[in-house]
Amino acid sequence: MNLVASLSDESLAGKLASLANTPADLDRMAGAVHALVCHAGLSLAHVETDLRKVLAERSFYGAYCELGAYEWFDRHHVDFAAQIELTGQDVLNPKGCIVDGRLNVIDAYFDVKGMGFQAYVADLFRQRLEQLLQGLAVTIDGAMDIAVKDIECYGFGQLRALAQKLTGGGAEKIPQLSWTIRAEPPRDITMSVHTNNPYRLAEENRYFPFKTATQFTRKRPFVLVFAYAAQFNHALFLNFASNTEITLRSLARRAFLQLTSDSTPAQRFDDQVAAGILVANAARLISGILFINLSNDDAWFFLNPRATPRSFDSTCRRFYRFLQAYQTQPH
């Protein structure tokens, strides 16, 4: 691809610096490129676009998780095709769209999303605030079982106002988030206190899967794939006291059971969805949710008992048995 000749040389910071200095991550990105070009039918030019997204802070996390999921599928011998263009008759977007791929083993479409939840978004908020408060280190104390949309509204929405109040250091509260923001000169050791209830976390983020409902397929099975990694969401990676399993299962139950009777317009969470589609309609189009821990290969696959088409249940179970069989093979 000769990206060295086309990309400017500049210093990396934050998550991009972590990526550049983590051999396992670099191997994962290289494996994804090989899988997409050699097995999934994409051109080098197409893959180059994805790599450029990894190198941009704004699009980094989503692109990283997408490539990580491709590599995970390929390494686990899951036959898939990548970047499938669908029409407005195929998906909830009347203009059509591109989904991340198709799982050939079960003939189902899928789309990959970075499962940052509040941890990644909160850290991104902290970094942005530090950039505005040059020379000061920012810590956040308080609840982490909150909705991503609330962080976007009450955190990012008043970012500059907070920066002005904290110019000389000190502490400010964000009551809507139950957060205390502290700005102090950098120290060798900093501490912050977080609280997290996995059930409340799932409840507050129950609409998270519908941020990209525009890609849900109308008549064909559809799998949502949520990927995450240790360096960007340590709490999910640790699975302390089974909190990760509880969170993921609770999130799936809300999408499959609670929201399949929710009359909220889906356009409230994704403005590209066709008019008249309710969250209840969209929820029934999610055949299953696959959560992938990219850092240790753990995965959880949840089936939607109220999904349409109902015939997906048997094919999904075949996929589940395939994954179980894989666990007994050397890899």
Image: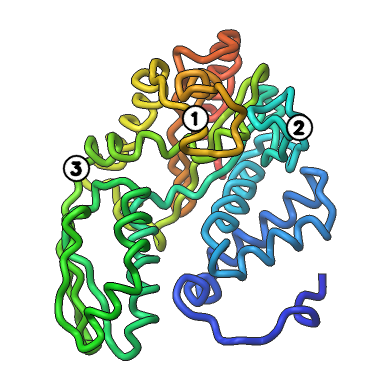
Q: In this rendering, is residue 43 above or below 126?
A: above
Q: Nearer the viewer, mark 3 or mark 1?
A: 1
Q: In this rendering, is residue 261 above or below 190?
A: above
> In this rendering, would 244 be left or right of 20?
left
Q: CA distance from mark 3 to mark 2?
A: 39 Å
Residue 86 is labelled as: 2
Residue at 44 percent across and 50 percent down: it is 296
Q: Nearer the viewer, mark 1 or mark 2?
A: 1
The amino acid beneath tag 2 is Leu
- Percent across and percent down for residue 225 are 53, 38
Which residue does the numbered mark 1 point to in the structure image? 266
Quarter of the figure with the C terminus: top right
**Alpha-carbon neighbours of circle 3 within 10 Å: few (<14), some, or many (≥20)?**
some
Q: Earlier in the sequence, mark 1 or mark 2?
A: 2
Q: Earlier in the sequence, mark 3 or mark 2?
A: 2
Q: CA distance from mark 3 to mark 1?
A: 27 Å
Residue 197 is labelled as: 3
Quarter of the image for residue 179 reads: bottom left
The amino acid beneath tag 3 is Asn
Q: CA distance from mark 1 to mark 2?
A: 20 Å
Q: In this rendering, is residue 324 above or below 139?
A: above
- Percent across and percent down for residue 193 are 15, 63
